[in-house]
Image: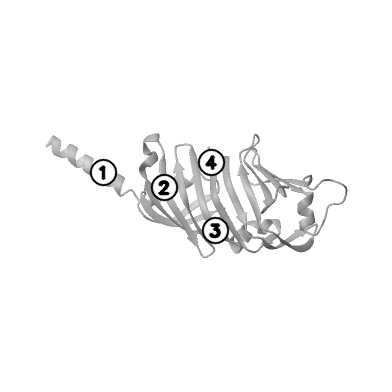
Amino acid sequence: MRNTIIFGSLLFLLFAVVFAPAGLMRTAFDQIPGATLTEPTGTLWEGSGRIFMNEQGLGTLAWDFSPAKLFAGSLSFDFTLTGPEHDLDGEITISSSAAALHVSGKIAAPMVNDWLAPYDIAISGTVTLDAVELGIVDGALEQAGGSVHWSGGLVRYTLSGRTSSATLPPLVAFLEEGFAGPGATVFTQPGQTPLIKAQLLKNGYAKIGITKLLTKLLNNPWPGSDPDHAIVLEVEEQVL
């Protein structure tokens, strides 16, 4: 009788683990600032749901458990994120206090413009993520790597109440780790003179510097004798 109870308990535990509901995946997204998972289906190990970032819909997320990092104390999942304006795939690894995201794929301009709308900026073309890596520790973005490519095209922006537009060449942003926080530097493709230098500070503020070369490309050249690589305009804004 005792052996039967033990066997039954172990069998129940096995079924509980194997068929753990997909809703448990919501806990993992608590590690990612602004992220929410809704309408989960399937199981914790293989399932899907709708994902939102800062209340903006990002499409359908499908995941599949990868056991490779289980013995290191982490849960790792391969995933795809699809929608009418994007197609992404990668891997997310989750531990008790950290998460690591590796992602590649394409995003069409309309989805990017939803993120840029608060800054009165709109682009055309396509954005491609190339082996982008993000490391989140205790809810804060601590690491970044990879690159983000933009196909180039028309840009509309508002500055000092005036709406302007310009056609830019293809651009690339290289993500990098910095002493004060993760950052990115934007160049033309090909090009060696930076256009934008951005950094996410540990206090939750983003610092963005624009060089003189970018003002030239936007048909609004900064006056003076500064070299093209000089930062002529810098702003800070709280993003987290």
Do the numbered discs 3 and 1 sit on residues whose CB atoms are within 8 Å? Answer: no
Q: Is residue 39 above or below residue 45?
A: below
Residue 89: x percent and y percent? Answer: 47, 54
Do the numbered discs 4 and 1 sit on residues whose CB atoms are within 8 Å? Answer: no
Residue type at tag 1: Leu
Question: What residue occupies the far right of the structure in this picture?
Answer: 224
Do the numbered discs 2 and 4 sit on residues whose CB atoms are within 8 Å? Answer: no
Q: Earlier in the sequence, mark 2 or mark 1?
A: 1
Residue type at tag 4: Gly
Query: Distance of mark 2 from mark 4, alpha carbons?
Result: 15 Å
Residue 218: x percent and y percent? Answer: 77, 58
Query: Distance of mark 3 from mark 1, alpha carbons?
Result: 39 Å
Residue 104: x percent and y percent? Answer: 52, 52
Q: Residue 77 has which mark?
A: 2
Q: Is residue 6 left or right of residue 91?
A: left
Where is mark 4, residue-wise?
A: 135
Where is mark 1, residue-wise?
A: 14
Residue type at tag 3: Lys
Do the numbered discs 3 and 4 sit on residues whose CB atoms are within 8 Å? Answer: no
Which quarter of the picture shows residue 197? top right
Q: Which residue: 47% across, 50% down?
A: 90
Where is mark 3, residue-wise?
A: 106
Residue type at tag 2: Phe
Residue 219: x percent and y percent? Answer: 80, 59
- Mark 3 falls on what kind of element? strand
Query: Distance of mark 3 from mark 4, alpha carbons?
Result: 21 Å
Question: What residue occupies the far left of the structure in this picture?
Answer: 1
